[in-house]
């Protein structure tokens, strides 16, 4: 069997490794002991509510990947990884409502309409008084990012995937027939010239306490005076995110970032003020200039899967499929030689 080395143990690397193992490759994953972007992600599978005019291609691949989540990617994973079904996107003020209408109109023009509402509190009664405008994206999902990563790793174990330390040079994996670079912001260190940069994002975890209002059943995304905030249900509370800064590799949460997230979250869902403040963390999204992932072949044996930005979990199935097709083509080329 051909041997594949996957460099990176986040959701992208694990999704690629699992699919390759299912296709008959002998797979070895090189992963760091440090927790990366996958550990602090919100876990939203939200191509509609993440959409914005000008990002038509990202919408297309996001919708294709969401379909893959629903048609096989969840196989082998525990059912509890899914924490919400459907998204409610709301606006706090008039300018925010105008932005939402821009997105809704654009989605409709692309042939993917969402359901507008001027009675958002009928959809989610816990919303603050005065929040009326928004839209519902019924097909979107949310997953527990940490459960997904652990479950993918466990599935890889069952498929015989081996584990190895991270590498600093591709020469360290020259024994493999093919290599996939899937280590996020560190990819340019292995292949100079990849246009990937780190973008910092802070995320909070709020834990439900006895006597508090219940956890919402769907993802709530909001525009709050021009800022975006998302509230993602978990079985024990809510994940709140996410700020966005160009601060290099700094992963220290800031007072200002945490304050803005808490203020905006409570402006949307006041009941969260009674929850327990359980965790604050910051991760580094691998972003590209056009916000599209970099997935494909770099040379005869080297592939890349990075640059997924804010859509790593959403695009994991699509990426695994795209890499699988490249690996199949590579195998066919080897047979013909």
Image (cartoon, rainbow, N blue to C red):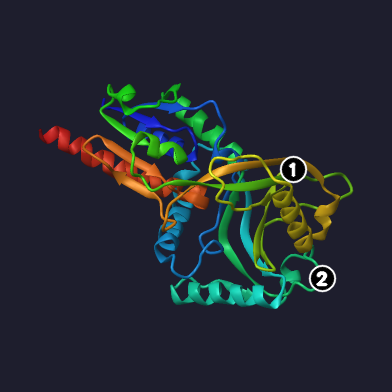
Who's the residue at 40% across and 33% down the image?
17
Q: Residue at x 69, y 78 (%)?
A: 94
User: Please, is residue 95 above or below residue 33 in the view?
Assistant: below
Query: Where residue 194 sits: x, y (%)?
Result: 36, 45
Measure the C-alpha gap from mark 1 to mark 2. Answer: 25 Å
Q: What residue is at 58 percent from the left and 77 percent from the top?
A: 101
Q: Quadrant of the C terminus?
A: top left
Dividing the picture into quadrants, the one containing residue 20 is: top left
Look at mark 1 in the image and give the residue it sits on: 236
On screen, 319 above or below 87? Answer: above
Q: From this viewpoint, which residue is outermost toward the front?
A: 247
Q: Is residue 54 left or right of residue 229?
A: left
Marks 1 and 2: CB-CB under 8 Å?
A: no
The x, y position of residue 93, in whole percent, is 71, 74
x and y, in percent, of residue 226 in the image: 65, 68
Give the x, y percent position of residue 195. 38, 48
The local secondary structure at tag 2 comes to loop
Q: Earlier in the sequence, mark 1 or mark 2?
A: 2
Quarter-wise, where is residue 55 in the image?
Answer: bottom left
Q: Nearer the viewer, residue 83 or 37?
A: 37
Nearest the camera: 96 or 9? 96
State the residue position of label 2.
129
Q: Residues within 10 Å of mark 2 (few under 14, many from 20)?
A: few
Number of numbered markers: 2
Q: Residue at x 59, y 42 (%)?
A: 283
Q: Which mark is residue 299?
A: none
Q: Is residue 336 visible?
A: yes
Q: Is residue 182 visible?
A: no
Q: Nearer the viewer, residue 135 or 284?
A: 284
Residue furthest to the right: 211
Q: Which element is circle 1 on? A: loop
């Amino acid at each position: 069997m051909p041997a594949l080395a996957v460099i990176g143990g986040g959701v992208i690397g694990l999704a690629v490794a699992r699919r390759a193992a299912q296709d008959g490759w002998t797979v070895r994953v090189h992963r760091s002991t440090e927790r990366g972007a996958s550990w602090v992600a919100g876990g939203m599978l939200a191509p509609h509510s993440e959409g914005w005019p000008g990002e038509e291609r990202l919408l297309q691949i996001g919708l294709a990947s969401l379909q893959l989540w629903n048609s096989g990617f969840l196989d082998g994973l525990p059912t509890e990884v899914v924490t919400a079904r459907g998204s409610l996107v709301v606006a706090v003020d008039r300018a925010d409502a105008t932005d939402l209408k821009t997105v809704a109109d654009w989605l409709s023009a692309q042939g993917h309409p969402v359901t507008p509402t001027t009675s958002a509190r009928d959809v989610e009664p816990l919303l603050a008084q005065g929040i009326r405008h928004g839209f519902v994206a019924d097909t979107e999902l949310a997953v527990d990012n940490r459960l997904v990563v652990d479950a993918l790793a466990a599935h890889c174990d069952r498929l015989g995937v081996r584990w190895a330390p991270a590498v600093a040079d591709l020469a360290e994996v020259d024994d493999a027939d093919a290599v996939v670079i899937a280590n996020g912001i560190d990819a340019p260190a292995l292949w100079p010239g990849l246009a990937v940069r780190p973008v910092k994002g802070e995320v909070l975890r709020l834990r439900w306490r006895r006597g508090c209002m219940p956890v919402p059943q769907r993802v709530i995304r909001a525009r709050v005076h021009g800022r975006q905030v998302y509230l993602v249900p978990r079985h024990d509370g809510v994940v709140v995110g996410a700020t966005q800064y160009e601060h290099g590799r700094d992963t220290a949460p800031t007072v200002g970032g945490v304050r803005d997230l808490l203020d905006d979250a409570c402006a949307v869902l006041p009941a969260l003020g009674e929850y327990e403040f359980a965790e604050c963390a910051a991760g580094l999204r691998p972003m590209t200039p056009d916000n599209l992932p970099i997935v494909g072949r770099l040379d005869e044996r080297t592939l890349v899967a990075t640059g997924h930005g804010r859509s790593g979990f959403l695009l994991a199935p699509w990426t695994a499929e795209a890499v699988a097709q490249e690996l199949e083509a590579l195998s066919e080329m080897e047979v013909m030689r």
